[in-house]
Image (tube, grey):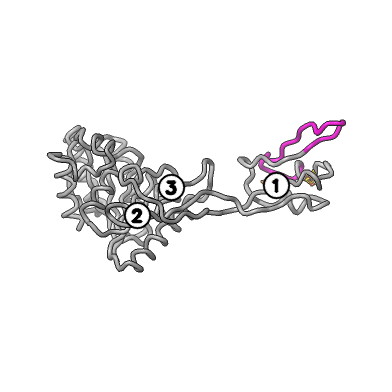
Amino acid sequence: MKEIVVVSGKGGTGKTSIVASFAALSGQAVLADCDVDAADLHLVLTPTIRRGEEFRCGYEAIIRQKDCIGCGACLARCRFGAILKSDGGAGEASFAVDATACEGCGACVWTCPVRAIDFRERRAGEWFVSETRFGPMVHARLNPGGENSGKLVSHVRNVARSLAEERKNDLVLVDGPPGVGCAVIASVSGASLVLVVTEPTMSGAHDMARVLELTRHFRVSAAVCVNKWDLNEEITGRIEKEARQHGATVVGRVRYDRAVTDAQRRGQPVVEWPASWAGDDIKAVWENVS
Ligand code: SF4
Ligand code: SF4
């Protein structure tokens, strides 16, 4: 089984359009949207959800008001300012946990003299298995402020691989998160190939170099594609040269084309759009990646 992960140094480089097009061209891949902070592959592929489950990760403290004696020991103990004190009426203080500030360290739980604080697994998001026109898709949604996107990414990848094994598909196509953080590391480690999609700008060149340092560190083969290359041919040339210097393979250029947005609005990959030069370019990139 091969796993191709498409990433970019930052969001908005056209990565998802390319993944959706690859899905259409490959025919039988299992898709995984690992951009869990801002998942958008579903906007192009309009999946039908077959299974959805909660993703739980870390812990949060919750004070049981009926058992709390208002001693304030938890407030003094919490290093993260997550215990809120308010007027409980009749001259007494009331205490509660600010869920957005709680780091789940558990210190307050062990400090409370009357064991009035519950310590529950935190609901960090949801993950889904869906069907699309081009094959099954695993995707997820991290709650606002939800942590451990890396763990959720690993989970999405694992489910996608199991699904591919089950259905005897030999390709997993991953829409990776942007940047070089924890979620990207969770997306690229152990992949067969990482395709870096970048744009012809100075920041695009810089972001690509950072991603290629990451792939080199994890010893994963890397390829580079410049999207909207015709907006600046000179920087495109520089990016391709730098990509080769980093040991990456240049797999093609994609022209700027309004058809990409038009196709997205209709929920279609651009390779299905009639007479689209971006679609033609992506087909050529897919040939090289294959
Ligand atoms: S679990 Fe830790 S961070 Fe959360 S309220 Fe208790 S002491 Fe503060
Ligand atoms: S330590 Fe326990 S009893 Fe004291 S204020 Fe906090 S929750 Fe209430």
Counting from the top left corner in percent of width and height, residue 93 is at 81, 35
Seen at 61% across and 40% down, the residue is: 100
Would you say 73 lies left or right of 121 here?
A: right
Frontmost residue, 226 versus 57: 57
Counting from the top left corner in percent of width and height, residue 3 is at 31, 60
Q: Where is mark 2, residue-wise?
A: 131
Seen at 66% across and 42% down, the residue is: 80
Identify the magenta region.
Answer: 76-94
Q: Is residue 93 magenta?
A: yes
Q: Where is mark 3, residue-wise?
A: 36
Q: CA distance from mark 1 to mark 2?
A: 38 Å
Quadrant for ligand 2 reads top right
Would you say 49 lies left or right of 55 here?
A: left
Counting from the top left corner in percent of width and height, residue 159 is at 41, 61
Q: Where is mark 1, residue-wise?
A: 62
Which quadrant holds the C terminus? bottom left
